[in-house]
Image (cartoon, rainbow, N blue to C red):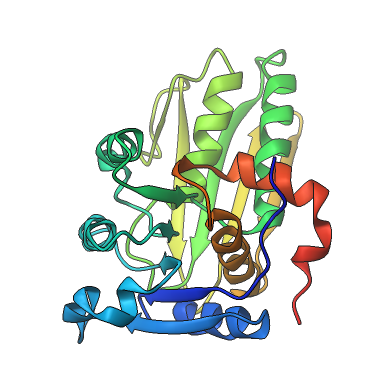
Amino acid sequence: MQKVLTEKMKIALIGYGKMGRTIERIAQSRGHEIVCKIDIENPQDFESEAFGSADVAIEFTTPATAVDNYYKAFAQGVPVVSGSTGWTARMPEIKQLCDDGKATFFWTSNYSLGVNVFFALNKYLSALMDNFVNYTPSMKEIHHIHKLDHPSGTAITLAEGLIDKVARIDAWTEDENAPSSSLSIGHEREGEVPGTHIISWDSDVDTITIEHRAKSREGFALGAVVAAEWVKGRKGFLTMEQLMQGLIKDSHLLDIK
């Protein structure tokens, strides 16, 4: 695998809320230039010379606008690193564009490196608990009041990892009264909570719980910028698994200046 790129880049931001501003600060601290910032008041800037000059666009918006944003970026030949969730029913068409050589796209449900360790822990524990049928799994995710979609993309990724490893669980649901063959996912929206995910395995005699609690947006923003650095010069549909392999070899890139 190629070395993760760290030379100065031109980055466009699609979505300039709290996450966009945090990404801007971290990107600039790592020596990159923000050449264009697009939000709801200036969608015409997708066609600007500044946007077209970007090496990559980092997109954090809403389920309703994300896919349209991708198409506008692809039309300008700009690769996209996206953290938007709630739109993934349309993922096959984005993958097809990448397979056809018409787009470069990187997406993950959560850019936090700690969360990606949590994904691996969840799969390991799920494989172990497949042997203990008296335990019933459930999940809860907690986010800030501005997050519109539920369950979170991270929760869905965790659920898919669990379902893949546990034969007696074949689906996830938000119905609290779901059958035992489904994983129940609850959600809460409160204050400015960056993101908490709790997975519990409950039996008559005890409960086993694993939890990831984000402390700020810093981890998500750093992960998105590192992904943008890695995407430069690559083509097609790119994954967090590929990026993590590179980071194992280049762990110094995780430092926040």
User: Which residue lies at the image location 67% right of the left edge and 72% below the top edge?
Assistant: 215
Q: In this orientation, which residue lies closer to the viewer: 205 or 120?
A: 120
Q: Is residue 67 left or right of residue 175?
A: left
Q: Is residue 240 left or right of residue 16?
A: right
Q: Position of residue 246 (x, y in %)?
A: 72, 47
Q: From this viewpoint, which residue is outermost toward the left?
A: 44
Note whether residue 220 is visible: yes
Q: Quadrant of residue 93?
A: top left
Instruction: Relative to 41, say whether 196 is above or below.
Output: above
Instruction: Relative to 70, say whether 20 is above or below.
Output: below
Q: Position of residue 177 (x, y in %)?
A: 38, 34
Note whether residue 39 is visible: no
Quadrant assignment for the N terminus? top right
Q: Is residue 60 left or right of residue 199?
A: left
Q: In this orientation, which residue lies closer to the viewer: 162 or 182?
A: 162
Q: Quadrant of residue 125?
A: top right
User: Which residue lies at the image location 54% right of the left edge and 62% below the top edge?
Assistant: 228
Q: In this orientation, which residue lies closer to the viewer: 151 or 48?
A: 48
Instruction: Relative to 3, say whether 28 is above or below.
Output: below
User: Which residue lies at the image location 27% right of the left edge and 80% below the top edge?
Assistant: 49
Q: In this orientation, which residue lies closer to the viewer: 67 or 229?
A: 229
Q: Position of residue 147 (x, y in %)?
A: 38, 67
Numbered marks: total = 0
Instruction: Relative to 185, say whether 202 is above or below.
Output: above
Quadrant assignment for the C terminus? bottom right
Q: Is residue 143 left or right of residue 254?
A: left
Q: Position of residue 126 (x, y in %)?
A: 67, 26
User: Which residue lies at the image location 72% right of the left edge and 42% below the top edge?
Assistant: 245
Q: Quadrant of residue 74?
A: bottom left
